[in-house]
Image (spheres, rainbow, N blue to C red):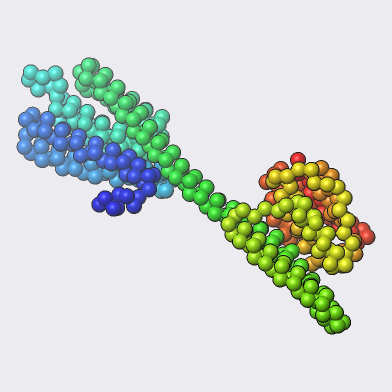
Amino acid sequence: MLGWWRSRGSAARFDLFVRYTFYLSYVFLPPLLLTSLAPEISTAAMVVLTAVVVTYVALSCRLVHLGIEHHLGRGPFPRTLLTTFLVATCAVLAAGALTYPDPLPGKSDSPGDGISVIFLVLAITTLSAVLRPRYVVLAAAAGGVWMLLTAPPGHALFISLMLQFLVAAFRSTLWMLAIVWELDRSREVRANLAVAEERLRFARDLHDVVGRNLSAVALKADLAAQLARRGRSSSAVDEMLEVRQIAQDSLDELRAVVSGYRTADLSVELAGARSLLASAGIDCRVIGDVTFDGEPAGALGWAVREGVTNVLRHSEAKTCTITLRGKVLTMTNDGVPPDPFRFGSGLTGLHERVAALGGSVTATPEAPNRFVLTVELP
């Protein structure tokens, strides 16, 4: 039993507590009614009353369960069962008042008053789990009016106040139950969003790291093969050594991506872009200096890396100009193919990085055969 209890979450535990708060009312109040009325009514009447109480309690428990489920948005409104319950409540109250209309000798109230009190308490407790607050308040007020018509004024006033107190207590408990379940759902959604965000980060960083490095490996390997064919073996060896170094750097960067601490240094990326593009026979000019650091510099570093990757993979550029003015980076290259332009996963990932800092990314082809990538940070 203890293991079962521990296996449930906090919201589920509080849910059970609220439900059993209602159910305990049905456990303690009916025996109190039957015990108090036993000396005042006949044995046959006691048997009939006991059967009525048991049936009424079973109906109330079922209605409370359905009412709480509807309150939490898990089930439909129990309209048919509620109608049956209200009819049964009115019938029991009327039967009690008609069967025992007068007080017993030496007492100020009749057995019918006791029946009315207990069944009204049970009814308001049950209706608190089903109806909206204003309707439950009206039901409690109707119960108070019934007591004023059938019971001594002092008793009737006390019962009226008690019924309103029950409404406030049980409705407050249900309100807290709904909040607890909403907080539980919010925590689950937050956890799922954190997982999704980490997956996006990993996919974006992996694309940015692997994309450019594989492009560089392909470029260097092709250059080494051409040098080898021309008999320039020493230069080919140098190129392959650079391929090995790029592969080792890629491995280090992949480890950083997995650990979640991958960042891009803007100065390093600018130097790497100039060197890599020069190896591909592309004249690269860098205009402007890096005058800031932190997240903005890292975001622009990723922009340089993505831009260089796209130049190598998707263009036949001869020139590339990288201009840095403050926190505005512009990359312009020629040799753009005539194919229709579309945002790929790399530019989409770059847009997500920059948007998180409140910036914007613009990538547009310009005639003739030019392409401009602009990243602007606030």
Point out the residue furthest to the front here: 234
Position of residue 136 relative to residue 335, above or below, is: above
Position of residue 197 relative to residue 34, above or below, is: below
Occupied quadrant, residue 15: top left
Position of residue 11 relative to residue 103, above or below, is: below
Q: Residue at x 78, y 76 (%)?
A: 237
Where is residue 248 shown, x and y percent of the image? 67, 67
Residue 223 visible in rendering: yes
Position of residue 311 relative to residue 17, above or below, is: below
Q: Residue at x 35, y 42 (%)?
A: 14
Residue 315 visible in rendering: no
Where is residue 295 shown, x and y percent of the image? 69, 46
Question: Left or right: 110 with respect to 262?
Answer: left
Give the camera-side residue of 246 and 44. Answer: 246
Point out the residue furthest to the right here: 368
Give the camera-side residue of 333 and 171. Answer: 333
